[in-house]
Image (cartoon, helix red, strand yellow):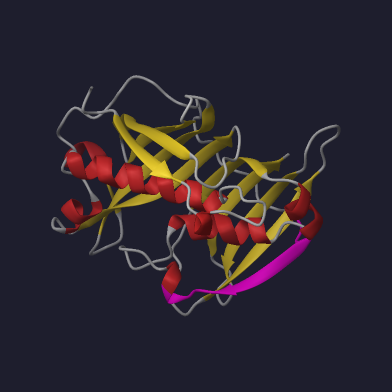
Amino acid sequence: MNELVFLKEYAIHTYETDDRGLVKMVTLLNFLQDSAGEHAGRLGLSVRDLVKRNMTWVLSRYHILVHRYPGIGERLEVTTWPSGKGGYFATREFEIADANGGPVLTATSSWMIIGLDRKQPLKVDDIIDIPYAVDKRALDDPFASLPVPSAREAELRFRVESVHIDWNRHVNNAIYAQWALEAVPAEVLRKSRPVELEISYRAEAFYGEEVLSVVQAVPRAGAGPVYLHQILNAASGTELTRLRTRWE
């Protein structure tokens, strides 16, 4: 197996499922993050490795397609690989399959390396001096800028709790997606599931802060609903995350 392609198995536990017994979106996001982190560590480029050099990884973008939501007890295989680097960004791909090889999730992502002193991005080619690309994208996305909601059709307020904080001492990336999904109308949450997520991470949130999750429906005929989302710092109005979701 090419060392640039990494496979890891996961089992879906009871506490990782919703009231229908199906895996939560936040769980799938945690599987992606965990597999990426372990693979980076095997390449000598984990968060722990970079922190020793006074820098760290920061997730910039996600584009995720969910083909189906598996249930309690199912075993999944996550495959991940870096697909390119240049300038201030490195891309990483993901595929999740079930025990029969059936597709569960496909995703692409973009990452930055920032210096811990100035919180400024560093050129990845200056940091990563090993072969670091498989010439294959799981999803072909150039990561164009996502649109901003033009109206606040609904908003929810959340307080950043200690359980939301990760190794980088800020809110973990999966939590922003959870905050966004919670603002969708209750009837959609009961009947539908998000099948496509595009996420742009733009600023950090820290313990004790309050955030606003804002949502707006996008008019769309003959298909499942689409929503634009923003996560904002409630005190300053700073945009933390921008999202677009599609539901079925």
Name the residue rendered at 56%, 48% in the picture. Answer: 23
Q: Is residue 131 magenta?
A: no
Name the residue rendered at 81%, 55% in the picture. Answer: 187
Q: Is residue 123 visible?
A: no
Q: Which residues are magenta?
A: 150-162
Name of the residue lying farthest toward the top: 135
Is residue 247 placed above or below 231 in the rendered structure?
above
The x, y position of residue 75, in whole percent, is 45, 39
Q: Is residue 163 visible?
A: yes
Name of the residue lying farthest toward the bottom: 208
- Nearest the eye: 164 or 221: 164
- Nearest the eye: 65 or 55: 65
Q: Is residue 155 magenta?
A: yes
- The number of numbered discs placed on residues in the rendered structure image is 0
The x, y position of residue 229, in whole percent, is 65, 54
Q: Is residue 239 left or right of residue 193?
A: left
The x, y position of residue 10, in whole percent, is 40, 43
Identify the image quadrant of residue 138: top left
Name the residue rendered at 54%, 66% in the picture. Answer: 238
Q: Is residue 79 left or right of residue 100?
A: left
Q: Quadrant of the N terminus?
A: top left
The x, y position of residue 193, in whole percent, is 68, 45
Q: Is residue 198 left or right of residue 228?
A: left
Identify the image quadrant of residue 241: bottom right
Identify the image quadrant of residue 206: bottom left
Name of the residue lying farthest toward the front: 73
Name the residue rendered at 48%, 25% in the picture. Answer: 100
Q: Quadrant of the C terminus?
A: top right
